[in-house]
Image (cartoon, coloured by chain):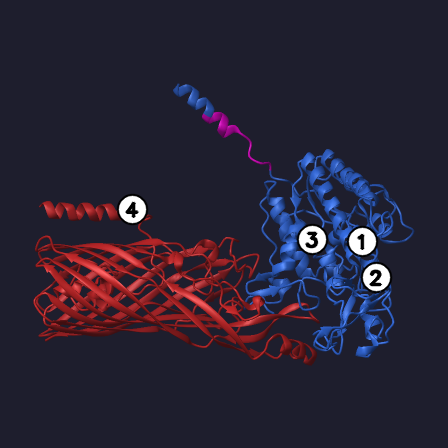
Amino acid sequence: MSLRFHFFLAAAFLAARPYEAAASGFAQDPSARTAGRAGAGFAVADAPSAFALNPAAAGFLKYRQLELGGHATVPFVGFEGESPYPGAGGKESLSHTPAVAPAVYYSHSLSDRLVFGLGVGEPFAFDYRWAEPEAFTGRFLSQRSSLHSLSLTPLFAYKLADRMALGVSLDVRRTTFRLDRHVAGIQPFTQLAIDAAALSTGSADTTKLSGAVGLLAKPSDAFSIGLSYRHKVQASFEGDATLSRIPSGNAQVDARFNLLYPGVLAYAAQINLPARAGGGLAYDWNEWLLVADVEWTDWSSFGAGPVAFEGRQDLSADLTGAWRDVFSLRLGAEREVNEVWRVRGGYAFAESPVTRDSISPFAPELRRHVVAFGATWSFGAWRLDLANTLAVHPARTTAGTSTLRFDGRYGGMQNTFSVSIGCQY
Amino acid sequence: MRHHGLVVGLVLCAAPAAAQPSFSQYVAVGDSFLAGVVSESLVESHQERSIPALIAHQGGAPSFMQPLVTEPGIPAELTLLSLAPTALIAPKSTVPGAPRLFTAAFHNLAIPNTTATDLATRTSDGGGMHDLVLRGRGTALAQAMGVRPTFATVWVGSDEILSAVRRGRAVEGQTLTPAATFRAGFQALVTNLRAAGATVVAGNVMDLTASPFATTLRSYYTDPITGEAVRLNGAVVPLLGPNGPLPEGTLVTLVASRLLAQGDGVPATVGGKGTPLPDEVILDASEQAQIRARIADFNRAIDEVCQAAGVPIVDANTFYQGFVKNGRAIGGIQVTNQFLTGGFWSYDGVHPTELGYAMLANEWIAAINSTGANLAPVALAPYLGAEPPGVGR
């Protein structure tokens, strides 16, 4: 009675403060299980993927367990221009190309108290490809921007007591970055902007070390509490961008632009992937599992200035702009239907980490209301997890404040389908 | 006690909001920058996109009459004939355009090559631009007052500065208007328009010594094709002026282009004639300092007069200083202070392009909105050329 009361008190407290519990950006759910609960699971230790949220979860996993899966995300985000630029009238959208990410997790119980784990996943990723990139009004800012951070996470979790575990993981993070866009030039004879060159940074990557630590306690058989912290990763990129001239149809103009836009240009960029800290509660109530998480993400550290092209300040734009730290709230529930089936669902609210004046085609991150559902089908030592997550992005306008002077209204939704297959042996 | 609180609340509710200005009778008084001169010319295709015309459109003015001039304008508009080996710019035609005949009063009373004093006092200039705009109906100020203006924009002083920049001479009373004379003329314009009941917004003067007219050419010899400095023994080769090699920092105006192409001002060591450039195409450090000091004088006068009259100011000078330093990226399109490839300045190097005027119009609109108006900014896509898909390019 007392525990149930406290759980609902805590859940009610979190639910009543949605605007303090905000935001999530392009963070990814680690597996189909957590995705089916809208990402909630800091206090859940039900599968190897749980330690991607909280390293201590591994401490409660028995035997050897393997989980293989991934997810595919399809964006349905649109953009409608506003004055002064690009102006009203144009409706454009992101390409519906799916972005696919792997999720592989393994846990090995070394003793009654010590568990080893190894995971491969993408805690952060985006791949924004604008449809009709040659005509997209924002093509001088971004036609395609992508960032993938693949994490290899070896970890150890140790049971400090029968009902409490501590987990520590190393995070070997390989981050890749790519930006494709056009460069505009003023055509001297018409005094109008034309597409002078196509710029691509290519796919640059860097590998950095980071880590995570977590604590998971089960004060009773029914009640769990989890805390987790994952450190930020500072990724620096250097490389040679290619600048491919786009013929203007005028030989004199082309000769001038050939001088202005050489074929290769050195560039440097820094992207800081944020730290994340959060806590959650879980409560087993008969055949039900109820979970609630709140997470803080250090989005204000994302981006560290412009993609800087050597000696060409005119080509160097701070595309990331200003981001802010945000909280996100996640609520989930699972029900064991029978020995074979479990179903789950969840809701999450995440405020946009991008300030209104910084939202841009480079990273059109928006407020999201996430509705998720999923199921597990168990057969012997094996199980199959499926989940679908729909993130609805209410329309948001820059209202004439865009620091890149590219104003408009962004909105839409994003659908993610996740699948994983697991076994215990 | 509760009663008193209610009274205070009612008083606060009854406090008037900032009155929204009316554009039912909008007049513009100024010089070539409000007239809409592009590439040296007053011509209807550009006048229709002048700053006052854009403001009138955004403000919903029911009528906005301008002294339109048919193609190719007066004087004939300059055009770019070729870029290589050097830029060749010339009038579109040897025959100028003509004023369109209107009987109605003009709302745009800006006159190219005028002064603040002339706007307040001059009625004719013997067939020049004043006569084209004024049509013998009195001074620009008198005609502006005659339409019973509800709203007015005043931007003057730029042509008075350009008089010195374009002649390469800073001579008090001849190419430079004395500060006190400017102040008196400007004060007459603002005070009378305010007294007529108009909401007035005024602009200050940009430092036009930074315009491409004065900054495109270098004081040293450059390769005509690449624009890079030609070096002898590792050192740049200064051009020649009346007093010998030009010191670093000397400004050489675009008027010198034709002379340099002929070898004048170019030392014999790099293939030139070795003859000096005339003083009229050079602004030395002293002349630059005099001109900038006068710009500061004008802007101080504009500040003080406007502050006393409660008139908001468009700080065009600060806008332009920032623009010279960083340009302005619009949706990734970099607009800069460069001649020909910058997008802001037209072929005369001292007057904006339509894009430049549209950008300036948005600065004006921001200041106008500080008076309680709610004008939408001017859409820039048509002036940039990169329009949204489906609209047509």
Q: Amino acid at mark 4?
A: Arg
Asked if residue A275 can be seen in this view, the reply is yes
> Magenta residues, as a range?
B9-19
Q: Which residue is mark 4?
A: A17
Q: Chain under label 3? A: B
Question: Around disc 3, counting alpha carbons within 10 Å, would you say few (fewer than 14), some (14 to 19), or many (20 or more)?
Answer: many
Q: Which residue is mark 2?
A: B75
Q: Are marks 2 and 1 on the same chain?
A: yes
Residue A373 percent across, percent down from the top left: 23, 63
Q: Amino acid at mark 3?
A: Ile
- As drawn, the residue found furthest toward the front would be B233
Q: Amino acid at mark 2?
A: Pro
In the picture, residue B75 is in which quadrant? bottom right
Residue A357 percent across, percent down from the top left: 48, 55
Q: Are marks 3 and 4 on the same chain?
A: no
Q: Which chain is red?
A: A
Give the Cα distance between marks 1 and 4. 62 Å
Q: Are marks 2 and 4 on the same chain?
A: no
Residue B51 — which label? 3
Q: Nearer the viewer, residue A45 or A241?
A: A241
Q: Which residue is mark 1?
A: B112
Q: In the image, is residue A90 above or below residue B58?
A: below
Which element type, helix, strand or loop, lies under badge 3?
helix
Q: Nearer the viewer, residue A43 or B282?
A: B282
Q: Which chain is blue?
A: B
